[in-house]
């Protein structure tokens, strides 16, 4: 009897997973088709002249990114002359010196590995290992080793010292806050006009992308978002890591096209319309912290980017939603780098998932400030709960569907349903987005991407579940430990000297 009940439970779970996969990815395929149609329809629209457009102040917060300063400046120096109203501000932070001291202390205890100390480059780890081998690794010695590389702020100052009049400046943030605090601090020194545009140090916005963004600014909308596709860099790593990195980049690109863009467009379309149904259909704004343009008055009215949450962009969507401020999507896609190993992917997702774990804090603060109505705050909480739960369930549900599809004793109807769900999750979006992502529309390429996508889905919930475990143990990212980073540190800080 017990064995029969167990079989019935497993079969019911398999059916639930297969049906959930069909429903979610079927809806995703519909939304994906809408996004691709919108992109194709808007691609040929004329762009207004730059002279009629407002000033744009690009702000790039930096932390432990010495090796990326010069390539970034080289890129923006080619861009700024083409956009007369654009300026660039790099914002360094005192958090870098604070983290360096913590890293020196951590280096004296425990293994000196990149998995334990991902903030350090391999050359720094080699020097620390050599000092330990000779019995000379004290906290002072570790600090001296890590202090051999200049800070990111020093590198910026040196790069800018020989030039002037480029509309490029450097602001040093004196606190220990992360990206949101750096941006908010920089805004205090910028002209209170036009737009604030937030990018990352490794962002390389192409001329077409910036022109499309400027075109959207012509009517002075409150917020404009450039959406991004992801591409793995193909660094030196194992074949398994290359497959997982490729799959994760494809999966994140597909998520942009069938979730992020539809969320933004739906929110823009229904925001401001009367009635509870319109509020429900508007859902929750989910901006992204690179390629995000905010009008200066909107930044001030919403209190700036939230500094009490781990991330800055998604929680900022709560303020925009409760204030009824729409986000206009740019009909052009950027390309940004993706992690190159399974460890980096899991670490990135572990950090990203804190956006959902922070919603209670953000909503309590909104209630304290009486932002939005109680009903709207409950709606935001419900949408966030659904999205967070879907991410936690993505890996387990996909695994159950795979088992249902290959298990010898699966019933034909269950196997067929699971196969349909897996096809909608992998082959369909891989084929539909191939040309948009990298133009590789061939049977071999789609097959390769489908397999990599499946692997990425099986791993997709690992980071979120680790974040939940961190929250259960009270281990909040960036609290007392060196600030975590989604991007890899420079491979050789000495290259920036």
Image: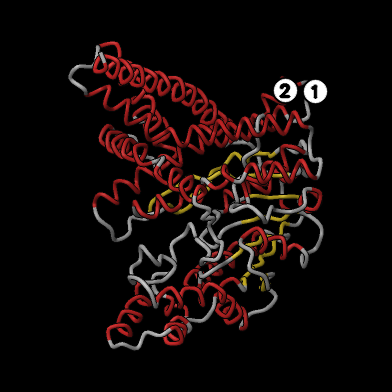
Task: Locate residue 139, reporting x and y percent.
Answer: 44, 83
Residue for badge 2? 278
Q: Is residue 34 visible?
A: yes
Q: Nearer the viewer, residue 138 or 187?
A: 138
Secondary element type, mark 2: helix
The total number of labels drawn is 2
Residue for badge 1? 274
Above-or-below relation of 234 to 285: below
Answer left or right for 397 relative to 278. Answer: left
Q: How far apart are the alpha carbons under marks 2 and 1? A: 6 Å
Can you say which quadrant of the picture contains the N terminus?
top left
The residue sitting at the front extreme is: 1
Task: Locate residue 153, reporting x and y percent.
Answer: 59, 76
Residue 342, label in figure: none
Question: Do residues under tags 2 and 1 come within 8 Å of each other at their CB atoms?
Answer: yes
Q: Residue at (80%, 23%) from the top-left corner?
A: 274
Secondary element type, mark 1: loop
Above-or-below relation of 331 to 75: above
Q: Residues within 10 Å of mark 1 (few under 14, many from 20)?
A: few
Quadrant in the rendering for residue 168 = bottom right
């Amino acid at each position: 009897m017990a064995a029969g009940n167990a079989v019935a439970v497993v079969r019911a779970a398999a059916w639930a997973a297969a049906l959930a996969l069909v429903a979610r990815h079927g809806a995703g395929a519909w939304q994906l088709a809408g996004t691709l149609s919108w992109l194709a329809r808007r691609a040929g629209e004329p762009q207004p002249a730059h002279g009629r457009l407002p000033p744009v102040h690009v702000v790039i917060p930096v932390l432990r990114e010495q090796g990326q300063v010069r390539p970034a400046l080289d890129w923006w120096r080619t861009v700024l002359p083409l956009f007369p109203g654009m300026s660039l501000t790099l914002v360094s932070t005192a958090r870098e010196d604070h983290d360096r001291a913590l890293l020196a202390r951590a280096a004296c205890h425990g293994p000196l590995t990149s998995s334990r100390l991902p903030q350090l480059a391999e050359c720094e780890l080699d020097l620390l290992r050599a000092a330990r081998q000779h019995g000379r690794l004290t906290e002072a010695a570790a600090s001296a080793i890590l202090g051999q590389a200049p800070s990111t702020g020093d590198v910026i100052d040196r790069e800018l010292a020989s030039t002037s009049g480029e509309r490029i400046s450097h602001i040093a943030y004196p606190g220990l806050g992360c990206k949101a605090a750096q941006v908010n601090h920089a805004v205090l020194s910028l002209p209170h006009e036009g737009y604030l545009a937030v990018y990352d140090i490794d962002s390389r916005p192409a001329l077409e992308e910036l022109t499309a963004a400027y075109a959207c600014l012509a009517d002075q909308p409150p917020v404009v978002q450039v959406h991004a596709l992801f591409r793995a860099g193909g660094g030196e790593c194992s074949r398994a890591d290359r497959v997982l990195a490729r799959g994760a980049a494809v999966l994140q690109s597909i998520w942009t096209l069938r979730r992020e863009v539809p969320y933004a467009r739906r929110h823009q379309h229904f925001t401001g319309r009367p009635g509870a149904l319109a509020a429900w259909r508007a859902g929750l704004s989910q901006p992204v912290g690179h390629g995000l343009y905010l009008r200066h008055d909107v930044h001030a009215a919403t209190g700036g980017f939230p500094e009490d949450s781990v991330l800055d962009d998604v929680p900022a969507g709560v303020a925009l939603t409760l204030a009824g401020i729409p986000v206009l999507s740019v009909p052009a896609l950027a390309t940004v780098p993706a992690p190159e190993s399974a460890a980096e992917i899991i670490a990135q997702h572990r950090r990203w998932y804190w956006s959902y774990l922070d919603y209670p804090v953000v909503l309590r603060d909104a209630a304290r400030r009486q932002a939005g109505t109680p009903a709207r705050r409950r709606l935001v909480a419900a949408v966030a709960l659904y999205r967070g739960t879907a991410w936690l369930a993505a890996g387990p549900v996909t695994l159950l569907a795979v088992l249902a599809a290959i298990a010898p004793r699966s019933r034909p109807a269950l196997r067929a349903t699971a196969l349909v769900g897996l096809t909608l999750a992998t082959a369909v979006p891989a084929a539909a987005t191939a040309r948009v992502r990298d133009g590789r529309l061939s049977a071999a390429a789609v097959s390769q991407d489908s397999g990599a996508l499946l692997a990425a889905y099986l791993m997709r919930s690992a980071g979120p579940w680790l974040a939940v475990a961190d929250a259960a143990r009270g281990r909040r990212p960036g609290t007392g430990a060196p600030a975590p980073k989604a991007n890899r540190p420079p491979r050789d800080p000495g290259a920036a000297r």
